[in-house]
Amino acid sequence: MNLKNIFREIIVILLLSSILGAAVNFSLVRRFVRGEFRHGFLAQKDFPGIRFITLAETEDLFGRGGAVFVDSRTRDEFVAGHIPGALNIPLEETKDGLAGEALPYPPDQTLVVYCEGGDCQTSIALAKLIHEQGFRDLRIFAGGWTEWSAAGLPVESSR
Amino acid sequence: MERGRPSCGIITVIRNKWVLFGCRLVVAGLFIWAGVLKIIDPLGFARSIQNYRLFPRELAFIIAIILPWVEVLSGAFLIIGIFRRSSALLISLMLIGFIGLVAIAMLRGIDTDCGCFGSLSRKADLKLILMDGVMLFLTLNVFFARPHPRLRGPS
């Protein structure tokens, strides 16, 4: 069999996969086009207590007080700088699940989870774990530490 | 061994029809399993792709929708024997891509799960590169096996 035939068959496999993928995930594709996943790949109907918030909303929550900020980055990153008053729950330390005493708050407590920002996904993964514990007012600040510190907002260092 | 072909020990063994069939079974089985786990949770796979911090959101979504089906179809074709060499080449290319991705993540110090087996994913580390390397060897063995009657697989 020559290479031309092989590449032709590869294209057939890729085309078939594209058709099957688009057909099976038709509703997901539609929701993506509508912009549902612009902040992160999290299905809102599966996690009704979680929503994404912008820098302005985060700043507002910070200013009003009452919300608890949760930093999902590593201990070293947290120590170097974080949002004042934030709790550090590094995602890498939650492989065996989240300890019950990690968040001693009632389920309706507003929690703002953040990570580095950009494409970092640890805030989403941690928010899902917290959601499983019954918390129902979770906000994910997708801009994360990068956006917060770049905006010149208050920061705290544990060093 | 067919007359006129050099009888080299290791080549004779790895090109044995049952060894080749075993290679197809192992590689195809793993790819079908990995693909199905990702098809079940496309958003989880999209998050895994984003973790590598190499692809824009749109591309991560498209890969998450299509790649699992490429894995399942090429695995199924490899086992059935339709498009066998094309499937082997496609799987080899995917494995080379996976090895490259994990290596880049390691070099950049990104601590992430590989995303290779959906929620059952393991860490993207050197062991994973070695496993992918072994798989690549098995797959290339199938690809380069001459499809002449005596060496053709059981199917």
Image (cartoon, helix red, strand yellow):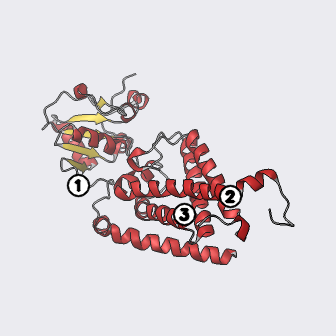
- Where residue B77 sits: x, y (%)? 53, 67
Q: Is label 3 or label 2 in front?
A: 3
Q: Chain of mark 3?
A: B
Q: Quadrant of residue B38?
A: bottom left
Furthest-top residue in view? A159
Q: Which quarter of the image is occupied by the N terminus of chain B?
A: bottom right
Circle 1 marks a residue in which chain? A
Mark 3 nearby-residue class (10 Å; few <14, some 14–19, many ≥20): many
The residue at the point 24 percent across, 48 percent down is A56
A36 or B139, nearer to the observer: B139
Tell me the residue at 52%/76% (across/down).
A12
Q: Which residue in the protein does label 1 denote?
A: A44
Q: In the image, which is nearer the foreground, mark 3 or mark 1? A: 3
- Residue type pointed to by label 2: Asn
Name the side, left or right, on which B1 lies relative to A120. Answer: right
Q: Judge whether residue B146 can be spotted in this image.
A: no
From this viewpoint, is residue A34 visible?
A: yes
Q: Residues within 10 Å of mark 2 (few under 14, many from 20)?
A: some
| In-image side of A86 versus B113 (left or right) | left
Residue topped by disc 3: B79
Q: Does A92 appear above or below B68? A: above
Q: For the residue marked with disc 3, what is the amino acid? A: Ile
Nearest to the observer: residue B153 or residue B142:
B153
Query: Do dots 3 and 2 share one subunit?
Result: yes
Identity of the residue drawn at 85% across and 60% down: B6
Q: Where residue A26 sits: x, y (%)?
A: 31, 70
Provide residue B154's location: percent of width, then percent of height. Answer: 61, 64
* Chain identifier of the residue bearing label 2 in the image: B
Instruction: Compute the Cα span from label 3 to label 1.
Output: 38 Å
